[in-house]
């Protein structure tokens, strides 16, 4: 019996300590760096305290990046959920076991591809002169279509790749969730002559409410990881129209000027916003 | 094929001789450890790897080249050199040479460059680019100025003479632009970066009389800068799709696939346009120097000796030997034999019979003619990349149309530069 | 009627998934001249050069070895620390378990740049920058937390009766975990491990910031094939993309099994 009381501690404590070290050491160090004036080119550093943070709020590219990141979150989360719910329901309603299994396998492919690969594949498909996606437009109109160079369309083109990766994956999850629902309420609704979409709108989706909210939550977290796609497809361009926070921090720290401290102060702000935001959200959902 | 074989035989012979002398006199080898090199992917450097044994016999050690693409190479080499400095040899370029040299991350080359390799043979312009603060820092891997490549067939069909001035260029580009037929007047660079859109823009800025500094103060908001920017933006209306956010790759790619009438780009493009493996317009192109008053952007990339990984004279000599060997006449001849026209730098190679045989008369003549147009356009200072990148962003926004005020943008840049210089 | 339309839509969607993938594989066998054409070419002279070039690069081989070593080691660390914790959380719930779960989840909120910048300086400072060890330790944060999260439902699905029976047979608490719960949950757990493997295999930003040469992973090597700024050898790039995507796709069956078992309502 004693052993049974001890087990949670021996199983949880070491992990907890390891995770805490791995997480808190870099976090605290990030805060320290953000209060200094470190650059890549000079090894020394002095404390400048909040200078970097003050500078950030006068930096139009930082404010722009905040806005772009927010747009990115909204676009990718809503589009992913919409695509996933529609496809999940279609699969649930219209397919037999064999087709369902085949589709499940196929729909899992995009999310497994390294994001770098997905980005390259679609970057070439979107290419205005040689791309597969833009080919019909070229053939029909004789004009070219450069989505990634259009300040308004570029973010949607990148978001499309994100939704391509996550939407299909979530569709499979939603299908599995629908399959796991008890069949009686759906049967009852069907007997009441409810139409297909009515059954889902009024019965099955409300039953999945908590699961769907969890999915939204997971997608919001994963959408923060936009860097790979943006880095490969536009590097933040055209201009700064797809420059998300992590892309801008990386540019400042590594590509353009090597201001690591400045980049770190951005990263710290990002961290505080997401930690506080998601914690509140999580507690509320719970 | 015959010349190639002869070259091979000769190199083997030389290698053998070196090996023999090494053994006969039991000299200690020049290199004690593998030479670590950080570079950018280049066909000529990949080719070096086939001759690994030759270097081993020459130096007593192997070499390892790590490749990073241009942007990453710039940032990573800076990060490495400023901290641990694990590379014996760095690949540097005209843009970051001042930073590397003035920060003490490099060792001056000539003290460790064996005289037998004949540094003076390198093209004079490239030697000049490799010089900073009165010292030579690197041996060129590639370089050149700008060259104008145009489509003979299209210009003839439209009855347009090859443009010799900027006004003629503007007129020709406008007239030749015919998107309905899949032909665009020109291909420029729109992608942000001191080595990207700013690099191309600079030729207009400098050509129109712009100066980075007047009396020690930033002078970016001069009339010349405004005119240059407006001209660049005007020409961009006729630039091939994909170039608005593209750089060298997108611009030259569009030309090579036959969709661009006139292009002014870095000189290595010229050889590519007549290489059937990459070009679909091999028999339709002709070359000329850039129209007046554009100044060709003189550039050079090359190998330099790192200071941290080579603390003593012996290791510096070893790195110097690698730099010399990798850029030797013999290795350039091998690149030539493979048709790699973009990575040749030596006068003796340009003057060789093989060169004329491989590339005909037109290209060598055009390359020679560009020399007088080539100038150093950028600000030779350690802070150049930061300044250039700042302008790169603004210029990309202007090209994308998310920003329209040219003068205001230049004023903003001027303020940035004033701040930068004051630091 | 509606059913047919739905099926057509679904097959179109499947084509949207497979189309680009197949197209990329085809492009891996094209010369640039066949790739850079205004009209996409279906018929061309296939060449194997791109593939042999990619496989022949020492950097690719090194990237592959690095990726395998780093992924397998960090997944293993994830197993050692993650599985016991997941079991304890699943089987011994108390007032702390929810907090623990949230703490582990919250680690995923941290933006990768925010972690990568300080870690870069830390590894530089202690001389481990650009080493496999540094990446393994860095990724362990990822693998441990994801293993805990995905393994909890796996253990919850182990029927309590089996564990009780083992206890009656005289197994102590640890033996129940190692000899009963672990083997029974194995199928689901393998799926969880596959997920954590794929996550680390695909990771890009941290690897980009924490390596220059010796510890470079395959995604970084592949992205470098693009030689951004100079001529992109699209054929070679496509070949590299295919190579990089193979290992995650090989795990497809395992992952699909994981999805099936974790969402099924059979046990519990």
Image (cartoon, rainbow, N blue to C red):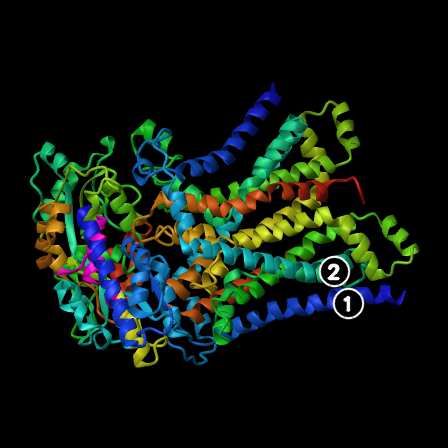
Which label is found at residue B62? none
Q: Report which quarter residue A121 is drawn in.
A: top left
Front residue of B207 and A75: B207
Residue C209: horizontal and vertical position, in percent?
A: 46, 63
Say which quadrant the C terminus of chain A sits in.
bottom right
Residues in magenta, as a range: B323-347
Residue C65: horizontal and vertical position, in percent?
A: 51, 56
Compared to residue C20, the image places residue A30 above or below, namely below
Residue B135: horizontal and vertical position, in percent?
A: 19, 75
Q: Is residue B420 visible?
A: no
In the picture, measured across the screen, residue A265 lies left or right of residue B134, that is: right
Which label is found at residue C84? 2
The residue that disc 1 covers is: A10
In the picture, measured across the screen, residue C241 lies left or right of residue A199, that is: left
In the picture, measured across the screen, residue C152 lies left or right of residue A91, that is: right
Q: CA distance from mark 2 to mark 1?
A: 9 Å
Q: Are marks 2 and 1 in contact (CB under 8 Å)?
A: yes
Residue at 41 percent across and 74 percent down: it is B83
């Amino acid at each position: 019996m004693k052993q049974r009381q001890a087990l949670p501690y021996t199983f949880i404590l070491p992990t907890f300590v390891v995770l805490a070290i791995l997480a808190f050491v870099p976090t605290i160090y990030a805060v320290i760096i953000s209060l200094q004036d470190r650059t890549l080119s000079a090894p020394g550093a002095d404390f400048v305290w909040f200078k970097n943070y003050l500078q950030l709020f006068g930096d139009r590219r930082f404010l722009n990046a905040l806005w772009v990141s927010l747009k990115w979150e909204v676009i990718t989360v809503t589009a992913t959920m919409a695509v996933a719910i529609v496809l999940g329901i279609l699969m649930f309603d219209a397919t037999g076991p064999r087709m369902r299994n085949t589709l499940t396998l196929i729909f899992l492919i995009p999310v497994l591809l390294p994001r770098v690969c997905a980005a390259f594949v679609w970057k070439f498909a979107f290419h205005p002169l040689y791309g597969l996606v833009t080919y019909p437009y070229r053939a029909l109109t004789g004009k070219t279509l450069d989505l990634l160079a259009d300040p308004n369309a570029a973010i949607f083109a990148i978001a499309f790749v994100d939704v391509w990766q996550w939407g299909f994956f979530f569709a499979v999850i939603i299908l599995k969730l629908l399959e796991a629902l008890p069949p009686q309420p759906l049967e009852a609704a069907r007997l009441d002559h409810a139409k297909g979409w009515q059954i889902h709108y009024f019965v099955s989706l409300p039953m999945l409410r908590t699961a769907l909210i969890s999915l939204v939550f997971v997608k919001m977290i994963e959408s923060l990881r936009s860097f790979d796609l943006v880095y490969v497809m536009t590097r933040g361009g055209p201009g700064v129209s797809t420059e998300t926070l992590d892309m801008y921090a990386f540019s400042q720290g590594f590509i353009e000027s090597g201001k690591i401290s400045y980049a770190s102060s951005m990263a710290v702000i990002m961290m505080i916003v997401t930690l506080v935001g998601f914690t509140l959200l999580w507690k509320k959902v719970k | 094929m015959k010349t190639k074989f002869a070259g091979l035989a000769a190199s083997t012979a030389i290698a053998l001789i070196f090996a023999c002398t090494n053994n006969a006199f039991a000299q200690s080898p020049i290199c004690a450890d593998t030479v670590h090199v950080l570079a950018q992917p280049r066909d000529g450097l990949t080719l070096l790897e086939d001759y690994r044994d030759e270097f081993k016999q020459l130096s007593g050690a192997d070499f390892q080249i790590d490749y990073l693409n241009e942007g990453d190479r710039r940032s990573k080499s800076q990060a490495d050199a400023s901290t641990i400095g694990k590379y014996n040899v760095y690949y540097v370029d005209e843009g970051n040479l001042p930073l590397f040299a003035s920060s003490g991350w490099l060792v001056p080359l000539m003290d460790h460059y064996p005289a037998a390799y004949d540094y003076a043979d390198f093209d004079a312009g490239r030697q000049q680019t490799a010089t900073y603060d009165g010292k030579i820092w690197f041996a060129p891997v590639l370089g050149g100025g700008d060259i104008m490549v145009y489509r003979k067939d299209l210009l003839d069909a439209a009855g347009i003479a090859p443009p010799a001035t900027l006004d003629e260029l503007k007129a020709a580009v406008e007239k030749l632009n015919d998107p309905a037929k899949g032909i665009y007047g020109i291909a420029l660079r729109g992608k942000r970066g001191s080595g990207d859109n700013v690099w191309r823009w600079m030729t207009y800025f400098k050509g129109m009389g712009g100066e980075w500094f007047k009396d020690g103060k930033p002078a970016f908001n001069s009339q010349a800068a405004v005119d240059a920017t407006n001209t660049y933006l005007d020409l961009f209306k006729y630039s091939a799709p994909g170039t608005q956010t593209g750089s060298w790759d997108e611009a030259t790619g569009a030309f090579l696939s036959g969709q661009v009438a006139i292009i002014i780009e870095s000189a290595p493009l010229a050889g590519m346009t007549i290489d059937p493996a990459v070009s679909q317009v091999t028999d339709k192109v002709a070359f000329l120097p850039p129209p007046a008053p554009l100044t060709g952007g003189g550039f050079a990339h090359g190998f330099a000796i790192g200071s941290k990984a080579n603390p003593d004279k012996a290791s510096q000599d070893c790195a110097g030997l690698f730099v010399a060997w990798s850029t030797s006449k013999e290795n350039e001849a091998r690149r030539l034999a493979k048709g790699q026209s973009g990575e040749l730098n030596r006068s003796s190679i340009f003057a060789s019979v093989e060169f004329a045989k491989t590339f005909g008369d037109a290209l060598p003549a055009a390359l020679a003619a560009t020399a007088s147009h080539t100038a150093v356009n950028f600000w030779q200072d350690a802070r150049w990349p930061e300044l250039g990148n700042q302008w790169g962003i603004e210029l990309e926004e202007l090209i994308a149309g998310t920003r329209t005020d040219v003068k205001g943008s230049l004023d903003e840049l001027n303020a940035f530069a004033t701040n930068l210089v004051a630091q | 009627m509606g059913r047919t339309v739905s099926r057509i839509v679904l097959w179109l969607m499947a084509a949207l998934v497979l189309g680009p993938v197949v197209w990329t594989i085809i492009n891996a066998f094209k010369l640039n001249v066949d790739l850079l054409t205004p009209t996409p070419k279906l018929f061309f002279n296939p060449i194997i050069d791109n593939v042999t070039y990619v496989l022949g690069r020492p950097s690719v081989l090194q990237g592959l070895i690095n990726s395998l070593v780093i992924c397998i080691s960090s997944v293993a660390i994830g197993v050692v620390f993650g599985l016991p914790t997941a079991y304890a959380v699943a089987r011994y719930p108390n007032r702390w378990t929810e907090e623990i779960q949230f703490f582990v989840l919250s680690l995923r909120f941290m933006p990768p740049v925010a972690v990568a910048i300080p870690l870069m300086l830390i590894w530089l400072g202690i001389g481990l920058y650009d080493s496999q060890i540094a990446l393994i330790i860095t990724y362990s944060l990822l693998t441990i937390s994801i293993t805990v999260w995905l393994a909890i439902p796996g253990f919850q699905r182990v029927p309590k009766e089996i564990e009780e029976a083992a206890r009656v047979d005289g197994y102590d608490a640890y033996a129940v975990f190692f000899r009963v719960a672990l083997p029974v949950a194995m199928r689901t757990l393998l799926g969880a491990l596959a997920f954590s493997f794929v996550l680390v295999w695909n990771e890009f930003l941290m690897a980009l910031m924490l390596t220059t040469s010796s510890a470079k992973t395959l995604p970084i090597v592949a992205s470098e094939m693009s030689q951004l700024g100079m001529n992109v050898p699209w054929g070679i790039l496509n070949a590299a993309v295919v190579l990089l995507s193979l290992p995650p796709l090989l795990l497809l069956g395992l992952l699909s099994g994981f999805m099936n078992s974790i969402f099924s309502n059979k046990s519990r």
